[in-house]
Image (cartoon, rainbow, N blue to C red):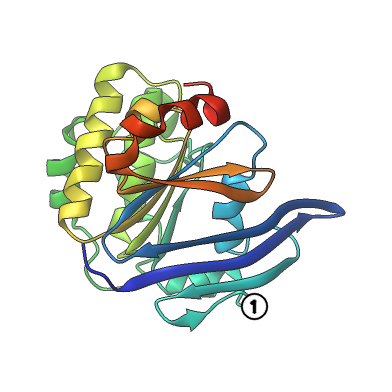
Amino acid sequence: MSTTEFLRVSDLHAFYGESHVLHGMDFTVRRGECISLLGRNGAGRTTTLRAILGLTGRRTGSIMLNGREVINLPSHRIAQLGVGYCPEERGIYANLSCEENLLLPPQVGSGGLSLDELYDMFPNLKERRNSQGTRLSGGEQQMLAMARILRTGARLLLLDEISEGLAPVIVQKLGEVIRKLKERDYTIILVEQNFRFAAPLADRMFIVEHGQVAAEIQRHEIAEKQEMLKEYLGV
């Protein structure tokens, strides 16, 4: 992991219509770092990912991506700067095969993984490459949603609740994939309810409450900050 700052979110406010959801989010992510946004439902974690990509309503504040201000750019331009979003609902096209789903998104940068590389990383998808999206299991759909953004060449990955509702063996596989991506210098933001999944992967964790960062925890501080984690997360 480098010391170069890749993303800086400063005093970020976001709105859905009249609803004010983010109340001054502040955090940074270094190139090659994996951070996790932890918090209870409704704290503003998913909205933070959506706001980075411009998928909320009105936004104010600053979002610096690789040294460039993107707060006023439309979503497609932000994506073209190398941001990949894996939403909680996965967004698999039901009538397309697994491989057609993989090939559909445009490339936003060089260095996207090839089909062969993706099938090496996700062997299940190779076995199911001709299966329709509707015939994939929940775990296979989650793998496909992740693989799809890796093909685009995105270098900043926004991953929303990727472990939710999946069998432990699939969750373990997704953790292995994230470790491999960190080795390849991807920058990753994980939104997770599953603290035990996020904690070994994240270099730093930000606890989000009421649309703000309430606390920052380094990985080596987890043991000494158990009381704080219990207070905020109930873990």
Q: Which residue is drawn at 18% across and 57% down?
A: 114
Q: Which residue is drawn at 17% across and 58% down?
A: 184
Instruction: Report the side of 235 relative to 120 (left or right).
Output: right
Q: Where in the figure is residue 13, as x and y percent of width and height?
A: 70, 61
According to the picture, the residue beneath numbered tag 1 turns out to be: 72
**The quadrant where residue 132 appears:** top left
Closest to the observer: 217 or 109? 217
Closest to the observer: 39 or 230? 230
Instruction: Report the side of 14 relative to 97 (left or right).
Output: right
Q: Where in the figure is residue 110, as x and y percent of width and height?
A: 25, 73
Q: Where in the figure is residue 235, as x and y percent of width and height?
A: 46, 21
**Quarter of the rendering occupied by the N terminus:** bottom left
- Asked if residue 85 can be seen in this view, the reply is yes
Closest to the observer: 81 or 37? 37
Measured along the vertical axis of the image, is residue 4 above or below residue 130? Answer: below
Looking at this view, name the residue that lies furthest to the front: 224
Measured along the vertical axis of the image, is residue 54 above or below residue 148? Answer: below
Q: Residue at x 63, y 51 (%)?
A: 212
Q: Few, some or many C-alpha atoms within 10 Å of disc 1 (few <14, some 14-19, many ≥20)? A: some
Q: Where in the figure is residue 146, as x and y percent of width and height?
A: 35, 45
Mark 1 residue element:
loop
Badge 1 amino acid: Asn
